[in-house]
Image (cartoon, coloured by chain):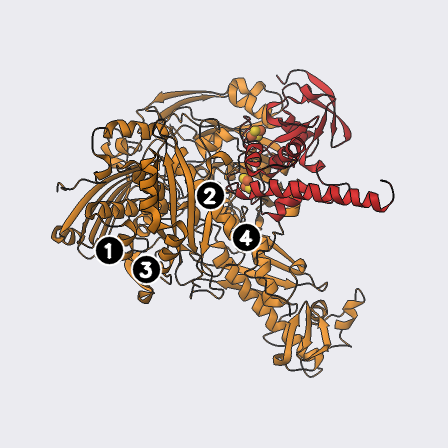
Amino acid sequence: MTSRMVGQPVNRVEDPRLLVGAGRFLDDLGQDAAELAVLRSPHAHARITDIDVTAALEVQGLLAIYTYEDLSGPLADPLPLLIPHPAICAGRTQYALARDEVNYVGEAIAVVVAENRYLAEDAVERIVVSYRPLPPVVGVQAARAAEHLVHEDAPGNVAAHFVQEVGDAAAAIAAAPFRLELELAIERSASTPLEGRGVLAQWDSDSQRLRMWTSTQTSTGVRAAVAAKLGLDLGRVEVITPDVGGGFGVKIVHPWPEEVLVPMAARALGRPVKFTEDRREHFISAAHERGQLQHIEVGFDATGRILGLSVRFWHDNGAYLPYGLIVPIITSTQLLGPYKPGAYRVEFDSLYTNTVIVTPYRGAGRPQGVYAMERTLDAIAGELGLDRSVVRATNFIQPSEMPYDHGLIFQDGRPLVYDSGDFPASLAKLKALVGWDDWPAYQAAARAQGRQVGLGLACYVEGTGVGPYEGGHVQIETSGRIKVATGLTSQGQGHQTAFAQIVADELGVSMDDIEVVTGDTRRFPYAVGTFASRAAVTSGSAIALAARMVRRKILKVAADALEADPEDLEIVEGMVRVKGAPGVAMALGTVAVLSNPLRYAFDEASKAATQFVVGDSDLPPVNEDDEPGLEGRDYYSPLRSTFANGMHAVIVETDPETAEIKILRYCVVHDCGTLINPLIVEGQVHGGVAQGVGGALYERLVYDDAGQLQNASFMDFLMPYVSEVPESIEIDHLETPSPLNPLGIKGAGEAGVIPSAAVFASAISDAEGFAITAMPISPSDLFELRRRHAGTDRHNESIAKKEPTR
Amino acid sequence: MTGSWHELTLIVNEVPLRTTVPARRLLSDCLRHDLGLTGTHVGCEHGVCGACTVLVDGVPMRSCLLLAVSVDGQAITTVEGLAGPDGELSAVQQAFQDCHGLQCGFCTPGFLTTITAGLIGCPDPTADDAREMIGGNLCRCTGYLNIVAAVLRAAELTRARSGEVADAAVDSGQVP
Ligand code: FES
Ligand code: FES
């Protein structure tokens, strides 16, 4: 029997290529392409009064310069607002090239195409733009104060205002025996993949077709957007995703200005054109995330049970709103985590600022929500003098309550209903893993030695695998090789390996015979994209269904040929054989030959399928309801998201002198349903935790009052090196299969990063004895906080105001 | 504007290659776009991420911080030159596969070149040595743990392979 591949830590099939330098990333393609460089605004907010390109025209190798005036038709309209929502009161998006006004440093004003990037940059430098600066709005507070407006027609700088409520939270809080209020802040960070954005386009004037490659998380999305912008039939546009050097959310946004300008130029110039973003451009013209201010009111009883929770937050969406309200909606719903507050009200404003746009970054609003909830639970525990884990357990949804309906609407417009999960079991595992019950003794002993150590805990639930759908195509060639395609894209998650594992099991073949293609609209034109930890769930399920379809056909064709009942057949190591009579067998390639009745024999194998050899002469060669070939195409469209969950604990030590924060241990308990490949899942957790460490302790995007990003380089934006990440991450898995899909899987891609801000704030508070309410936190921040708290009895200080002012 | 052009010879992965570049051409661009060796990646172009690391006369250097003209005549090893002539993965490459040391693979060439040189100076690294060895390279995907494991595994594989070579030599009677 072929051993089962799903569940095995199989080595990745992607690796050999990538290890020898044979990957094909965007800038590895189109070596003969002309190159495009972008003139970007140096002002955060200004009117453009003049653009003078005269001096640039002398640059040798110059092919073209485009400004807004050169755009026509749909290209001259603002870029799309991709995800409309009724709560959006002033949805604004940018033009592909700025028209009259710029709203952030980095906004594209003009593009130059030249023989190479060096020359294109030479020309960019010589374009003279005259500006009339306007007052910039930087940061949530300035946006909220609305002394100045980002967009004149967006009063209060409010892009959207949204309220959801279950029960009467205000009344429940007022009636509760205990009440607290918290003010929390979390700053910006960014996906920061090591490869930036990039686009290459080729216009074929003979066939009037556009072929483009882009470093994206959605090739079908780009295809539709480019076709619309360039006024081309969808059938004339092909989008191929090459190897992508990381995405983490930022590459789901589309179309970027460059994604429409590059094909526009390629068509106009009749030659391939390429844009490769540089690192500074990525910081100032891609996207950021995370920045929010939060105000929380909570009412609870003596056991720590939350009776009413009311959250008001302000979300910084940057200068434009191309991705709608996905991030704040996720914050507002996923904030609830594994808990069931008696009544819940959430209200948010999504605010414009003169800074880079905010769109999902791994975690996509969840880290902020988890931070709000977990800080609140720590505050309750502190207030009541209860163990922090006990307060959490008191508020858990129990396994017997699954599926659990929160009564809210989730980011996909569907009810927020948890499908599965065993939170008490997860917490028990985590407590055992980290040694929770021994902690007080350890901490006391450390304190006696003058060491400050803290233990933090944070829990989350993550809606993964959102719809609307993905599809899969599985085809068996006459060689016996199996070609698999799905439309969504890959950025390092090992999809080719994981999907091949699924197909190997479904068909009973070796992984070596399977080739998987993702993100190529020529191979699979219907798809949504890779985000929300959805690839394994949606494409994995679709591919499994497509493979099952092929399997049925294999058995039918082989049964005819072997004169057996399909029920009596099995597929083992690429051979279809009669159970119990392994001698009566046929290779899958032969079945593929037989599945396609032929008139012409082009080789030895195909002779077997010609008209004098096969077929029942009383039936048409291709019967009704049948199709030639051995292939299957199917789709998986989930009713709702499936909810993964996890709990993290971290032990930190803070230096009494320098306030340096050191990670002593990091523990993860993770439930993403059935594991397809534990090696890949652990890799995802490692990477997520590292990004979480960065977001909690190092990374922030520092804007000055003029809206200039002060740290737009890897020198100044402190992405973790190996020296900043924990030396080991202790992981324990719980597998609660999802009932919603054929494989029982839940998404795993984002999990590692979600509870980081919360778990570090918890641990540092525990070490210091005062509450951390603003993240990320650097040693200088901590040093400053210590100074402010000096003289108070730190170890008895509560996290929050005890007497709410209402 | 592009200044003067210079003819130069680079011995890339043991093959002498001639090309003509403007003085301002970065070595990274010269390797990638003039010589077509796109395995060397560019993640920042300001010397911080290490993705562009190549070995210049055996020493790891950031090709985005070097002008191509400044290494005229020198021997350069890129990721394309690490595998054996028969295509067999080098010990470091094999270790990355074994330990799942890469995800998107964009940073990987810089790690592979850095570690290849590092293990020559430190053939028997501890975990701390391994962390030190890769301490100047950024990876956004893996969280580094598996890369540290890959350094240790590569050292092990290198020892095993040189053992095999020695054994084979004994078997064939070359070594007394
Ligand atoms: S590209 Fe050279 S160090 Fe980053
Ligand atoms: S594997 Fe993607 S940056 Fe390292």
Q: Secondary structure at mark 4?
A: helix
C-alpha separation, residue under disc 3 versus residue under disc 1: 17 Å
Rendered orange, the chain in question is: A
Disc 2 residue type? Answer: His
Q: Secondary structure at mark 3?
A: strand
Q: Nearer the viewer, residue A371 or A594?
A: A371
Q: Quadrant of residue A598?
A: bottom right
Question: Residue at label 4?
Answer: A679
Question: Residue at label 3?
Answer: A415
Disc 1 residue type? Answer: Pro
Q: Quadrant of residue A185?
A: top left
- Of the two numbered discs 2 and 4 on the same chain, state the one appearing first in sequence: 2
Quadrant in which the N terminus of chain A appears: bottom right
Q: Is there one chain holding both mark 3 and mark 2?
A: yes
Q: Secondary structure at mark 1?
A: loop
Question: Residue at label 1?
Answer: A341
Question: Residue at label 2?
Answer: A254
Q: Residue A693, percent across and down?
A: 42, 39
Q: Residue A552, percent across and down?
A: 59, 73
Disc 4 residue type? Answer: Leu
- Of the two numbered discs 1 and 4 on the same chain, state the one appearing first in sequence: 1
